[in-house]
Image (cartoon, rainbow, N blue to C red):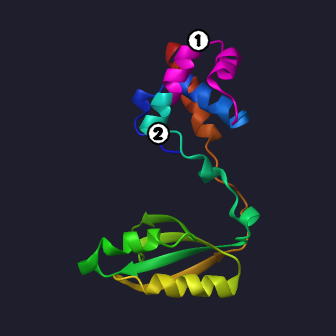
């Protein structure tokens, strides 16, 4: 979840996000009742949260393993500095590449990849190596997820922000 500027989001936004985290199917009317805020206010805030990028697409909540992609790996990608940019569209064309980040350190890009098994990961890695501009990959398989991605602490901090300022 990316909240671009904390000054543009306040405690009500945080409370709305926390309520949605507890009940993702809640509509504006339900949220307004839960939070004690006018429905139109909640509706306007939800629209603003979506426009700002604070609320991401529903598909980001999917568990790849439930879709048959039980293997997750992180690929460090070394790219040709003279051809920077062409690899982005190549990676986007591979459905199993679910996230790409530009990084510092030895890797230029870090790709999060899902696969149905090791042979499938090998196929995907070879497909990635065929992309213009990608020179080398290094793969680290994920063996367990001791801590899931979490944002509730950050959202709670945002939702309590105004009450701390008022004290």
- Judge whether residue 5 can be spotted in this image: yes
Q: Which mark is residue 5?
A: none
Label 2: which residue? Answer: 3
Residue 146 in the image: state x and y as whole percent: 73, 61
Q: Secondary structure at mark 2?
A: loop
Q: In the rendered structure, which segment of residues is drawn in magenta?
A: 24-46
**Residue in the picture at 57% in, 31% down:** 157
Q: Can you say whether 165 is above or below 131 in the image?
A: above
**Residue in the picture at 40% in, 35% down:** 5
- Judge whether residue 108 can be spotted in this image: no
Q: Is residue 102 left or right of residue 73?
A: left
Looking at the rendering, in which quadrant would you find the C terminus? top right
Does 39 appear in magenta?
A: yes
Does 71 appear in magenta?
A: no
The prevailing secondary structure element of the residues shown in magenta is helix
Label 1: which residue? Answer: 38
Q: Which residue ends up furthest to the left in the rendered image?
A: 82
| Quadrant position of residue 31 | top right
**Residue in the picture at 60% in, 87% down:** 122
């Amino acid at each position: 979840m990316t909240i671009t500027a904390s000054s543009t989001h306040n405690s009500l936004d945080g409370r709305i996000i926390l309520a949605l985290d507890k009940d993702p199917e809640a509509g504006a009317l339900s949220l307004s009742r839960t939070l004690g805020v006018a429905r139109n206010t909640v509706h306007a805030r939800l629209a603003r949260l979506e426009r700002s990028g604070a609320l991401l697409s529903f598909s980001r909540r999917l568990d790849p393993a439930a879709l048959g992609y039980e293997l997750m790996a992180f690929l460090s990608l070394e790219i040709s500095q003279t051809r920077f940019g062409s690899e982005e569209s190549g990676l986007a064309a591979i459905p199993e590449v679910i996230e790409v980040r530009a990084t510092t350190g030895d890797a230029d890009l870090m790709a999060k990849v899902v696969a149905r098994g090791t042979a499938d990961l090998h196929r995907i890695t070879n497909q990635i190596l065929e992309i213009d501009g990608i020179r080398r990959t290094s793969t680290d398989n994920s063996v367990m997820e001791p801590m899931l991605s979490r944002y509730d602490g950050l959202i709670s901090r945002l939702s309590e922000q105004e009450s701390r300022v008022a004290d």
